[in-house]
């Protein structure tokens, strides 16, 4: 299949807001991919990845700097998706002395064979900024439409397989797609996509989302329906598979980090029973039992065997696993069992390594549990319906997370030219806190939370405030204040203030405030002392 066909479909998807139209366009492309070329199955997998906005290679070594000064585009579309995938695979495999120049030469060759539109598409894939409105969920639905099977069946197969590409390949090339879907089952040793939680601003709203709203009485009790409330730990999501003494530890993105976390492997080997698949969090805990800053956990989990400094870090920081769900135990799959049953099994095998939990029907008691968790340095809580199955791979209706929301009034220092669906707009904003000694201190950037109306407004506003342009970055006069919500702070060597916002998102622009009234870097540092810094 030609890359130009994928690019054309990407353009069609970006040009419409209709989810049905996006799905139909992708389904049409996948049907064509399944009947084209010498290896249609491979073409399907590559097309699925590209239309979901990602390369199949997790890391290529390329970045924006690598893509400057590329050769002029080709006149004719000759690249196939197989050729492009092989080229990126070659670049990803390069290492050692001279690899940077070899990778640059390979990139120049690839991009030189691409048309102007294909070059833009490939740049978006490399940078992870192909904002075409076709996320993996849309592609999964398109796979179902392409072969005429229920979307829920495809979603479940993708969840169990841990990836969309292999499922798409199997069903699109199968004589009986429904029978092909049935071949995907939970397999100990192969990670599944984790269940995710919806969000609510407070515990009462979480109760409402689960359909157990308060009675309105003086005690704030719910209608007799109990829920489970887990402390939400500020660690890394882990999924642990054990078959005998063979243990594998996977991250939320299904990366295998077993070799980096021997303490978790040993802890799981000591648990009773035989085969296990557990869902949980791992984090570094101080001697006082209080979680250490998140970046210490992140650094520890990223430790590899090579540098001596990493070995020293591994010795000084130890990850502790805490589990909140079980997907399989002793030969029995538990995905479709209600949470109350899964918790019974979990408590039988994990004992002291289970996440702290409250089961209650009382809204007041739940709110107190949330406040206590936050006071102890945790992220918040997750409120869970006891009758809910494990809705892996999506934000199921049975889990609702509640975290304290922090806000700051910051100043926009620069803004980036949008790409994909946001082409023609100024999108990603650079955020700065006021320095009382003069100037502003950058804390990060975000495009989260922006509506189309907001994008249109800020494009006009920041065009008026523009002072200079550096590539795709437009520097602006520091006058516009924006209210930003964020989940926490972390240390950062990337920004001059040594801090960065976690999960920053735009709430609103503050025309009622001047830059002189924006929050200061001292305010941010004070928050850092209270939160996860």
Image: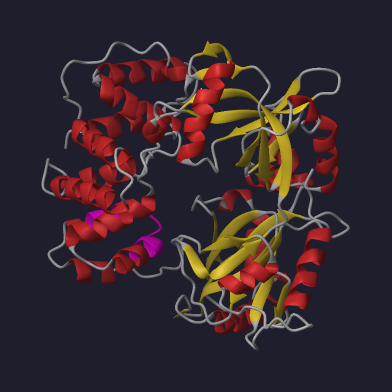
**Residue 65 magenta:** no
Can you say whether 523 is above or below 394 in the image?
above
Residue 304 in view of the camera: no
Name which residue lies at 41% across and 29% down.
419
Q: Nearer the viewer, residue 374 or 79?
A: 374
- Residue furthest to the front: 512
Residue 227 in view of the camera: yes
Q: Quadrant of the C terminus?
A: top right
Q: Main secondary structure of the magenta part?
A: helix
Residue 354 position, x and y percent, is 69, 71
In the rendered view, does 444 fall on the left or right side of 57?
Answer: right
Can you say whether 164 is above or below 417 in the image?
below
Residue 65 position, x and y percent, is 48, 18
Residue 99 position, x and y percent, is 45, 20
Residue 16 position, x and y percent, is 30, 42
The image quarter in which residue 319 lies: bottom right
Range of magenta residues: 157-170
Name which residue lies at 32% across and 52% down.
19
**Residue 160 magenta:** yes
Q: Nearer the viewer, residue 239 or 123?
A: 123
Q: Nearer the viewer, residue 452 or 356?
A: 452
Name which residue lies at 54% across and 36% down.
447
- Residue furthest to the right: 288
- Protein image colouring: secondary structure
The image quarter in which residue 445 lies: top right
Q: Quadrant of the N terminus?
A: top left
All told, the count of numbered labels is: 0
- Residue furthest to the bottom: 224
Can you say whether 266 is above or below 24 in the image?
below
In the rendered view, does 350 fall on the left or right side of 22?
Answer: right
């Amino acid at each position: 299949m030609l890359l130009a066909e994928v690019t054309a479909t990407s353009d069609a998807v970006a040009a419409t807001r209709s989810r049905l139209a996006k799905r139909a366009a992708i389904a049409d492309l996948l049907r064509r991919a399944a009947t084209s070329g010498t290896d249609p199955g491979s073409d399907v997998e590559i097309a699925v990845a590209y239309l979901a906005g990602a390369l199949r290679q997790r890391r290529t070594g390329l970045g924006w700097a690598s893509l400057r000064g590329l050769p002029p585009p080709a006149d004719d579309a000759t690249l196939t998706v197989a050729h492009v995938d092989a080229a990126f695979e070659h670049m990803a495999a390069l290492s050692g002395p001279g690899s940077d120049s070899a990778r640059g030469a390979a990139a120049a060759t690839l991009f030189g064979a691409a048309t102007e539109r294909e070059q833009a598409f490939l740049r978006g894939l490399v940078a992870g900024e192909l904002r075409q409105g076709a996320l993996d969920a849309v592609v999964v639905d398109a796979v179902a439409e392409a072969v005429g099977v229920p979307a829920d069946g495809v979603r479940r197969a993708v969840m169990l397989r841990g990836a969309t590409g292999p499922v798409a390949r199997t069903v699109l090339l199968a004589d009986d797609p429904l029978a092909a879907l049935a071949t995907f089952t939970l397999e100990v040793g192969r990670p599944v996509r984790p269940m995710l939680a919806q969000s609510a601003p407070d515990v009462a709203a979480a109760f409402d989302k689960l359909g157990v709203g308060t009675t309105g009485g003086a005690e704030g009790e719910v209608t007799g329906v109990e829920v489970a409330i887990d402390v939400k730990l500020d660690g890394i999501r882990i999924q642990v598979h054990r078959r005998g003494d063979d243990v594998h530890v996977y991250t939320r993105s299904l990366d295998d980090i077993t070799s980096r976390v021997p303490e978790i492997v040993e802890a799981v080997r000591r648990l009773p029973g035989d085969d296990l698949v557990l869902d949980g969090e791992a984090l570094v805990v101080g001697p006082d039992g209080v979680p250490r800053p998140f970046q210490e956990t992140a650094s520890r989990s990223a430790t590899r065997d090579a540098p001596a400094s990493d070995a020293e870090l591994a010795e000084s920081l130890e990850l502790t696993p805490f589990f909140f769900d079980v997907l399989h135990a002793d030969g029995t799959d538990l995905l479709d069992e209600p949470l109350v049953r899964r918790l019974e099994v979990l408590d039988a095998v994990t004992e002291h390594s289970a996440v702290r939990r409250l089961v209650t029907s009382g809204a007041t008691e739940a709110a107190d549990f949330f406040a206590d968790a936050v006071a102890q340095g945790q992220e918040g809580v997750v409120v869970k319906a006891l009758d809910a199955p494990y809705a892996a791979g999506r934000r199921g209706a049975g889990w609702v997370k509640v975290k304290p929301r922090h806000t700051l009034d910051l100043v926009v220092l620069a803004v980036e030219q949008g790409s994909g669906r946001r082409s023609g707009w100024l999108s990603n904003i650079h955020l700065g806190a006021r320095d009382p000694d003069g100037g502003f201190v950058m804390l990060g950037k975000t495009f989260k939370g922006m509506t189309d109306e907001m994008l249109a407004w800020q494009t006009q506003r920041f065009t008026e405030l523009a002072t200079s342009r550096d590539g795709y970055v437009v520097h602006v006069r520091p006058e516009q204040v924006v209210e930003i919500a964020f989940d926490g702070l972390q240390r950062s060597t990337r920004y001059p203030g040594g801090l960065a916002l976690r999960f920053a998102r735009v709430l609103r622009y503050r025309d009622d405030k001047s830059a002189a009234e924006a929050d200061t870097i001292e305010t941010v540092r004070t928050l850092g002392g209270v939160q996860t810094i």
